Structure formats: C-alpha cells, structure tokens
Image: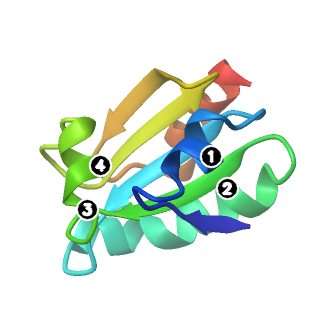
Amino acid sequence: MEYQFTKDNFKSEVLDSKEPVLVDFYADWCGPCRAMMPIVEEIANDYDGKLKVGKVNSDEQQELAAQFKVMSIPSFFIIKNGKVVDQMVGGMPKAQLEQHIKAQL
C-alpha cells in the first residue's frame, strides 16, 4: 500500500512509524518521477508489512520539501526511528532502489 504524506500526517505516519519508511518526493509534471511511479508501487507491494512506502507531492508540500532540503526530484529518503538513514536522488532501476532498502531492513 502506498501512502500520501503531508505536513499534517508526516509525524504520525513517518517519524513515529514502527517500521522503516521510504518517502518519495515527486511532482506530477516530472518525467523521471512518473517513470519511477510503477517501481515505487511494486516496492510498496513487495515490502508490505516490512516497509511503509509513501509519496510527498513537493509542489503541494513545499514546507516538507524545504525541511528535507529537496533540490531535485524524484528524491527518496529512507527514514528509520524518525531519522534519515539513506537518501537517493533521481530515477533508477528497481534493483538499485531495492539495494538501498535491503541495507536498512
């Protein structure tokens, strides 16, 4: 299942999450973001119960994007116990994203 994170639910859904969280900062107009959508969806299904996966629309949630110093999208953050433990920028193959995830599980 994919979540939609906003400044209103970010603390409860991400920072206070018992499981690690993959946060995808994206925008609707961004080609590489759109290319990553099916990959992120697959990861959400593949790691259901082990990893929470969600998106942040950086146009609508500019405060969150600024808080995480997002300069390029897509930007991916793995957050564990309320702290960023890994960060990736740009489109990438599923296997590459999975390597980062597996290192944190």
Residue 2 lies left or right of residue 72; in this view the side is: right
Q: Considering only order in the chain, which callout, 3 or 1, is on the residue closer to the N terminus?
A: 1
Dot 2: what SS?
helix
Q: Considering only order in the chain, which callout, 1 or 2, is on the residue closer to the N terminus?
A: 1
Which numbered disc covers residue 64? 4
Residue for badge 3: 58
At label 3, which amino acid type do we have? Ser
Residue 75 location, x and y as percent? 31, 46
Dot 3: what SS?
loop
Residue for badge 1: 12
Quadrant in the picture for residue 98: top right
| Count of numbered labels shown in the rendering | 4
At label 1, which amino acid type do we have? Ser
Q: Nearer the viewer, residue 41 or 25?
A: 25
Neighbour tally class for label 3: few under 14, some 14-19, many 20 plus, Cα within 10 Å? many
Mark 1–mark 3 Cα distance, whole angstroms, equals 19 Å
Q: Residue furthest left?
A: 71
Q: Considering only order in the chain, which callout, 1 or 4, is on the residue closer to the N terminus?
A: 1
Look at the image and tell me in which quarter the N terminus lies: bottom right
Of labels 4 and 1, the one closer to you: 1
Label pair 1/3, CB-CB below 8 angstroms: no
Residue under the image location 21 percent in, 72 percent down:
30
Which numbered disc covers residue 43? 2
Q: Considering only order in the chain, which callout, 4 or 3, is on the residue closer to the N terminus?
A: 3
At label 2, which amino acid type do we have? Ile
